[in-house]
Image: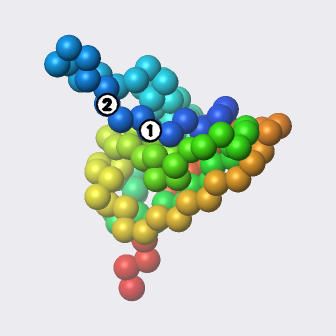
Amino acid sequence: MLITILGSPIPKARARVVNGHAYTPAATTAYARRVAWAAREAGIDETLWAAPLVVTCWFFMANRRRADLDNLIKAATDPLIGVVYKDDSQIVDIEAHKCLARQNPRAVVEIEIANTD
């Protein structure tokens, strides 16, 4: 399954606490909705639901602004829980790449069933 999320990839931000109440920053929440929507548009492959998975991510950034690769991965994979796969613990192998693409920023997530042989 190949999922393309158009626009600048947004790293997952930590939850914020204000007056004792935790909340997720709006940019993180909005990006999570875009990721889930892009997955639905790509077509759900139900064979992925409970299988061990291999995930490859490419993050094409609009600028050289600092973004941690691990937070980009979480922003691209966490919203897929309950949409593409049952739980992110199914991911047994992951590869990720970050590069500059000023003209066409996007994230591309490829999900395959792991070879268990």
In the figure, 91 relative to 106: above or below? below
- Provide residue 46's location: percent of width, then percent of height: 40, 50
Q: Which mark is residue 47?
A: none
Give left or right: position of 90 versus 111.
Answer: left
Q: How many marks?
A: 2
- Provide residue 109's location: percent of width, then percent of height: 56, 51
Residue 36 in sight in this render: no
In the figure, 52 relative to 103: above or below? below
Q: Which mark is residue 12?
A: 1
- Provide residue 6's location: percent of width, then percent of height: 66, 34
CA distance for labels 2 and 1: 9 Å
Numbered disc 2: secondary structure: loop
Between 83 and 95, the residue placed more toward the observer is 95
Residue projecting furthest to the right: 103
Q: Residue at x 70, y 43 (%)?
A: 64
Q: Residue at x 60, y 38 (%)?
A: 9
Residue 10 in sight in this render: yes
Numbered disc 1: secondary structure: loop
Q: Amino acid at mark 1?
A: Lys
Residue density around tag 1, few if under 14, some if 14–19, many if 20 or more, within 10 Å: many
Q: Amino acid at mark 2?
A: Ala
Residue carrying label 2: 15
